[in-house]
Amino acid sequence: MHSKNIIIGDINPANILFVSPKEIYFVDTDSYQIGPFPCPVGTINFTAPEIQGIHYGDFLRTMEHENFAVATLCFMIMMTGKTPYSHQGGSDPAHNIKKMLFPYRFGENITNEVPDGMWKYIWSHLPYKIKDGFYNTFNRNGSHSKPNKRLTSSEWLDIFKYYLKLFKRGSLQEQDNMSIDIWPTRAKKVINKIF
């Protein structure tokens, strides 16, 4: 669709229906942005920081806006429905997105704002490449946080193909058997490494 200058605009899980792993339907397609016709609707959690609060029908979205929505959808898939800016002490979703205060730990960047529950465990078990993509997209100082630097759908696809390769090879289980669980109950165990 992107190669045909079609932007979904209103990307959200409710508009993607899975019949099987090979049969997927996109619904609510009457609101797609096609050429010069704007997408008049959207969802706050999938709206890029720079267009939060702007009436959707008043402007044309860019591929950079779409890339933010795709990254958000990828995050929610891996984090079982949790949005990237949900955090302890956070404000409303639009405010959290505008501030780009990403609560998950990456390298030396540590916060104490990860949402209560299993989220910190799920995050710790994600492969480095996926965490790198998410952190650098959603953290305000990340290398992919600026609109023109955001990862594209193709780049996300490559990252997830790498994840699938690790999964099929058994590399995730070699590091920690719980890394293949949907809902791990503890942080990832790796010798001489803290996550």
Image (tube, rainbow, N blue to C red):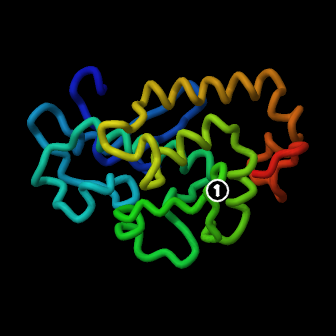
Residue 192 figure quarter: top right
* Camera-nearest residue between 76 and 174: 174
Identify the residue at horizontal 82%, vertical 28% (top origin).
171
Q: Is residue 92 above or below residue 133?
A: below
How many numbered badges does the structure rendering display? 1
Q: Is residue 172 left or right of residue 11?
A: right
Quadrant of the frame with the N terminus: top left
* Camera-nearest residue between 95 and 157: 95
* Camera-nearest residue between 104 and 65: 104
Residue 9 figure quarter: top left
- Horizontal and vertical percent position of residue 126: 70, 43
- Horizontal and vertical percent position of residue 80: 62, 53
- Horizontal and vertical percent position of residue 145: 40, 46
Q: Is residue 55 left or right of residue 147?
A: left
Q: Is residue 100 left or right of residue 89?
A: left
Q: Is residue 195 above or below residue 85?
A: above
Identify the residue at horizontal 36%, vertical 41% (top origin).
27
- Horizontal and vertical percent position of residue 175: 86, 36
Outermost front residue: 108
For badge 1, the amino acid type reads Arg
Residue 172 figure quarter: top right
Identify the residue at horizontal 51%, vertical 58% (top origin).
83
Helix, strand or loop at label 1? It is: loop
Neighbour tally class for label 1: few under 14, some 14-19, many 20 plus, Cα within 10 Å: some
Which residue, given by chain and number where applicable, does mark 1 sit on? 105
